[in-house]
Image (cartoon, rainbow, N blue to C red):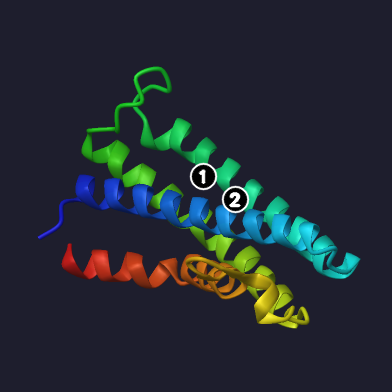
Amino acid sequence: MTTASDLLWRVNNEYQKRLKQTRTYLGLLEQLMLMQHEDGTTLAVLSGALAKVDALLEEHRTWRHHYYYESPDTKRMVQSHGAINQALANFSRMRARHEHELQQLNMLLLRLQRPDPALTRVPTGDLWSMAEYAVRDLSSFSDYMRSLADAH
């Protein structure tokens, strides 16, 4: 059984991991498209996508400093039952706002004409597919939260 403090710790860490992974893949994809001299539309969409993800990362960082940490200086997770519940409630509200942004981002990326897969191939796979998957994975974070809450 998952405790509320464990739930808070897990959602924070997993969400941060997914945000950073999405940021990394989109950033690498943008750099790759710049090197390939890709059209301006693709680059503009990728730059806009990065700006959105950066804003989500910043909002998550702000949430951590206001609700997750007892003090921004110690960066120790809140411990009281009330503070944990407040942090989880505020995380859920933040996440609901993010979900709308991520759905828009996902639709925007799906509308882009995908470059030739030979141009987006990197040693670990297809960077375009990895970026799309990272956005979808971040978008479906609510499923992860439900699975944790069900275990709670």
Residues at discs 2 and 1 in contact (Cβ within 8 Å): yes
16 relative to 130, above or below? above
> Are there few (<14), some (14-19), or many (20+) residues within 10 Å of tag 2?
many
The residue positioned farthest toward the left in the image shown: 1
Question: What residue does disc 1 label?
Answer: 60
Q: Is residue 68 left or right of residue 128?
A: left
Disc 2 secondary structure class: helix
Q: Is residue 118 left or right of residue 113?
A: left
What is the x, y in percent for residue 99?
56, 66
Residue depicted at x 44% and y 37%: 64
What is the x, y in percent for residue 112?
77, 78
What is the x, y in percent for residue 105?
67, 68
What is the x, y in percent for residue 134?
51, 67
Q: Quadrant of residue 50?
A: bottom right
Give the quadrant of the N terminus. bottom left
Q: Is residue 139 left or right of residue 1?
A: right
| Label total for image | 2
The disc placed on residue 25 is: none
Residue depicted at x 53% and y 36%: 62
Q: Is residue 43 left or right of residue 135?
A: right
Q: Amino acid at mark 2?
A: Leu
The residue positioned farthest toward the right in the image shown: 40
Q: Amino acid at mark 1?
A: His
- How far apart are the alpha carbons under marks 2 and 1? 6 Å
Residue depicted at x 81% and y 62%: 43
Question: What residue does disc 2 label?
Answer: 56
66 relative to 57, above or below? above
Residue closer to the observer: 82 or 20: 20
Residue depicted at x 60% and y 50%: 56
**Could one spot residue 48 in this view of the protein?**
no
Disc 1 secondary structure class: helix
